[in-house]
Image (tube, helix red, strand yellow):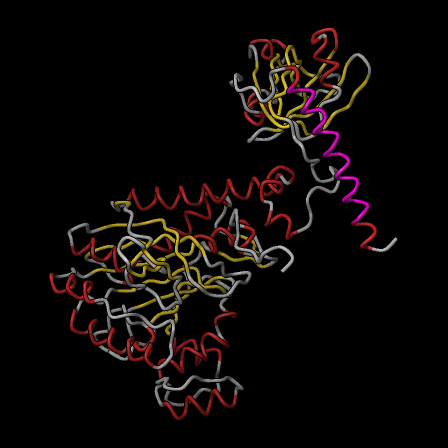
Amino acid sequence: MTERQDESQADAEESRHIAQRREKLEAWRQEGHAYPNDFRPNAHAAELLARYENAVEGDLQGAGEIRLGGRLMSKRIMGRASFCHVQDASGRIQVFVEREALGTTYEAFKHWDLGDIIAVEGRLFRTKTGELSIRAAHLQLLTKSLRPLPEKFHGLTDQEIRYRKRYLDLIMNPATRTLFRRREQIIAYLRQFLRARGFSEVETPMMQPLAGGAAARPFVTHHNALDMPLFLRIAPELYLKRLVVGGLDRVFEINRNFRNEGLSTRHNPEFTMVEFYQAYADYRDLMDLTEVLLQGLCREIVGSTELSYQGQRYDFGRPFARLTIEEAIRHYHPDAQFDLRDVSALQKFLQEKGLATEPGLEAGGLQMIIFEKTIEAQLGDPTFITAYPAEVSPLARRNDVDPFVTDRFEFFVGGREIANGFSELNDPEDQAQRFRMQVARRGGGDEEAMHYDADYIEALEYGLPPTAGEGIGVDRLVMLLTDAPSIRDVILFPQMRPQGS
């Protein structure tokens, strides 16, 4: 049988099952009580299993009446008594069903389908094999599942279907439910960590009149009433710094950002970041803070400061390495023994390495090509890279001793950037000049260059205190802490091409 014939037969079989389930639904409707909403559970499967794992019979009787709602995941019909497993949001538990206790409901139960959502009322007991179970005194069908679940022994293994139909992935794969609970715990830890250090959580606009705060292509929309274009934010940075101008010395936002860029295992056009700003601090303070944050997060989520990601082990318990951009270039390219700010020498070096350049780049931009194309992927152990060129850091403060670079860092682990932070540029005249340089780049065809934000310049003119800010990619952080190979694994509904395109 060909693959196409096999798929056609499977589709026909599914259609037959759906038709049978619709007939059952119609019969249920005729009885006059389809889709009831009068059941309220008082227990969850995982809590029962944990609480009564080692309980003796007397303790089980003391648990009282259990009311649990969930999805019917398995059935074993055995004449006058049967077993099934019911899965709720926390996990699954076995239910013992017998005709003597349920009467006519038992006959109805035998015709319920896997995937149906049911209510169970009864008491806890242990089977002869010692499995904690609920002895059902009452069963009720709450929701009829009209489509059959994926084949129970193999689960849902098609990766694309898992992303497109996350609800099926969550039903069939306990590991997926665990991963997204971990994501929730990670975000809760970030929020708790910052609040404990005096940061206030705020919300800033997701639709902005100018796209700013990062170098990226925005999504553009139009507001009809105002008759003006708006941009989905690529970063909340400029609004958060306006709040620091306003006197909110420590602010953070766990935010959704949107960038009209490609899809990959590391990129989704809609993604989550935590971004925070601290007045009277510099980039070194935030590097120290980030080190403490990530070490604590590893202990909280992984249970250790050592973690394994895609077969590699990383130690977060040791002080993180710190290298400047130029130190990294010389370390990974011992042959780069020339002036790393000489444009001609850099262009020659790039040509020798077979790396393409872009017109108009100065020394800083050329350094970044070397770093991003040849070094970044090699940064396995937790590492801060510092002293980014001012040319590629339009919002960062120049270094007092060496104005060619800024007081900026990025944090890498496993060859991936996780965080970006810097001492903020609070000189309005310097910021205005850098905005003008960005506008010139846009005029030259750079669609990721920033706009000139006159309102932000005006805010700076009122006075931004010395400030440091940082953004951490939450999705990439979740990938790292859950050993997920793709960003799509850690986003409930990742962006996908239309099916069949």
**What count of labels does the image hold?**
0
Q: Nearer the viewer, residue 284 or 242?
A: 242
Which residue is situated farthest in the right direction here? Answer: 1
Camera sees residue 441: yes
Asked whether, in this view, residue 345 is left or right of residue 227, the answer is right
Asked whether, in this view, residue 117 is left or right of residue 186, the answer is right
Q: Nearer the viewer, residue 289 or 100?
A: 100
Camera sees residue 42: no
Q: Residue 269 in the image: x percent, y percent?
A: 46, 59
Residue sitting at 56 percent across and 56 percent down? 496
Residue sitting at 71 percent across and 18 percent down? 109
Above-or-below relation of 328 to 93: below
Q: Residue 132 in the image: x percent, y percent?
A: 66, 20
Which residue is situated farthest in the left direction here? Answer: 462
Which is the main secondary structure of the residues drawn in magenta? helix
Q: Residue 399 in the image: x percent, y percent?
A: 24, 73
Residue sitting at 38 percent across and 71 percent down? 448
**Quadrant in which the C terminus appears:** bottom right
Can residue 25 be found in the magenta stretch?
yes
Asked whether, in this view, residue 329 is left or right of residue 63, the answer is left
Residue sitting at 53 percent across and 17 percent down? 39
Above-or-below relation of 134 to 190: above
Q: Which residues are magenta?
A: 8-29
Can residue 164 be found in the magenta stretch?
no
Q: Quadrant of residue 442?
A: bottom left
